[in-house]
Image (cartoon, grey):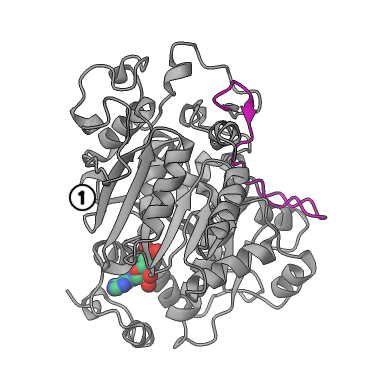
Amino acid sequence: MKFETLGLNKAILEAIAATGYTEPTDVQARAIPEILAGSDVLVSSQTGSGKTAAFMLPALQMLAEPHPVSGNGPRVLVLTPTRELAMQVTKAAETYGRRNRRVRVVSIVGGMPYPLQNKLLRQGVDILVATPGRLLDQMQSGRVDLSRLQVLVFDEADRMLDMGFKDDIDAVVARVPASRQTLLFSATLDDAIVRMAATMMKDPVRIDVSGHKTRHVNIEQRLHFVDDLNHKQRMLDHLLRDVDVQQAIVFTSTKRAADELAMDLIGQGHTAAALHGDMKQGARNRTLENLKRGRLRVLVATDVAARGIDVQGISHVINFDLPRQAEDYVHRIGRTGRAGRSGIAISLANVREAFQVKLIERFTTQEIPVITIPGLEPKQRGCDKSPFDRKGKPGSRGGKPAARKPGVWKNDATASRPSRPPRDGVHPARSADGRHAPRDTDRRGQGAHGGADRSASGPSTSSKRSFVSDNQSTGWKKASHFAGK
Ligand code: AMP
């Protein structure tokens, strides 16, 4: 199929040609004609599928027509869960809109200085890209006028719900014109998303681009069993010394672990840096820039911070700590294999975590082959076959897998106890010694202005997505101190 068949105008086709795209991706081919026809669309598609262009190209086309009412307020609003994704969408809007008549794109995210945001908003905006908390903050201060809004886009809507943005989203939606067109993109269209869509969309056309089964065909997945932290660290060092690793993202489950592991890797001679939500926005931007420019080979990141990173040089994703939710696994590995390239996703797990791996495999319906590396073989029993093949209890006291919701697990040590109700919507993570480990809460907007962006630690409206995990790096770290590190 050609872009020319989708009904896009000449300026946009020229901009697409200039980016080097030769044909639309699946999501673009299916969503663009519907959006141009004025329908609301509810789309399940992965990051990496070309979803940004799927909503941005028709939005830019709409901007080519003058608005009947003059004013400074945006005509297109894109809500994203994270600052990184907001910046990526902003950049995409600028790239795809470069042949359009002047299109003003502004992003409003937590952590950004207010005076600069205020100035940008005063100058007028066509496309506003925002995280919900900071946008609401600016709306309440009367600096954003949404009365001219024509297109409202939710990008990675599932993640916004996971991060507790539902109330903020409702507050924003209550203040945009009912006549708007609504476009909702989400990796999964689960009950929470469909319920949300029912309240804010008009007869949406549902487009399922890729189920879990067909995703990530260009990403080779591997599982290495490890005995303990020391083994895990040696394994990571070995993996990163592979010359095939162009650039890698290594995931940890906590911010502290990200910092500590990045320091360890630097000590071992790797070009590494951490990325997490406790870092100042400037430092995060510099780290991402270094990654994009290839000056950084290894990024040690938490889930929220790495969300939406689109760097084509990422050849490997390594789960140093397993993700808390199976859905996060899919988001993590989607950082590699970008734009049609191939990638390798490696998970490191001990035998007690086999149950978590099994839940991931069920979620993706893909087996993750167990690989052993000569000289780094695990000594523990039961590390020789894939959790996919295991019947019954893969991880000792794992309980009955069938009773659990897909994508939600409890680690073996806590599975037999009822999980404590979250105090503030978040289950405290525990380290292996029973102490509470700091979660990767990635609280945002906590600067001098008290920005309102929230994140995984914010009030979760989908507590079914939270769970307790013992797979905490601090627990492992403690073991490493015992090991005399
Ligand atoms: P997204 O899913 O929007 O994050 O896009 C993922 C990557 O695919 C980005 O690097 C885009 O530049 C790239 N991309 C988007 N559309 C196309 C296309 N039609 N052909 C090739 N690459 C594309």
Which residue type carries mark 1? Thr
Q: Which residues are magenta?
A: 430-453
Q: Nearer the viewer, residue 109 or 140?
A: 109
- Counting from the top left corner in percent of width and height, residue 57 is at 39, 73
Tag 1 secondary structure: helix
Q: Image point 50% across, 87% down: which residue?
A: 101
Q: Residue furthest right?
A: 448
Q: Is residue 310 magenta?
A: no
Q: Is residue 140 left or right of residue 356?
A: right
Determine which quarter of the picture holds residue 349.
top left
Determine which quarter of the picture holds residue 449.
bottom right
Q: Is residue 448 magenta?
A: yes
- The quadrant where ligand 1 appears is bottom left
Q: Residue 15, relative to residue 147: is it above or below?
A: below
Q: Image point 21% across, 77% down: which residue?
A: 5
- Counting from the top left corner in percent of width and height, residue 247 is at 41, 65
Q: Nearer the viewer, residue 198 or 17?
A: 17
Q: Residue furthest top?
A: 417
Q: Nearer the viewer, residue 103 or 278?
A: 278
Q: Is residue 112 left or right of residue 152?
A: right
Quadrant (top left, top right, bottom left, bottom right) of the C terminus: top right
Most common secondary structure along the magenta stretch: loop
- Counting from the top left corner in percent of width and height, residue 154 is at 47, 54
Q: Residues within 10 Å of mark 1 (few under 14, many from 20)?
A: few
Q: Residue 37, relative to residue 11: is it above or below?
A: above
Q: Image point 43% across, 68% down: which residue?
A: 311
- Counting from the top left corner in percent of width and height, residue 261 is at 56, 49
* Residue behind mark 1: 214
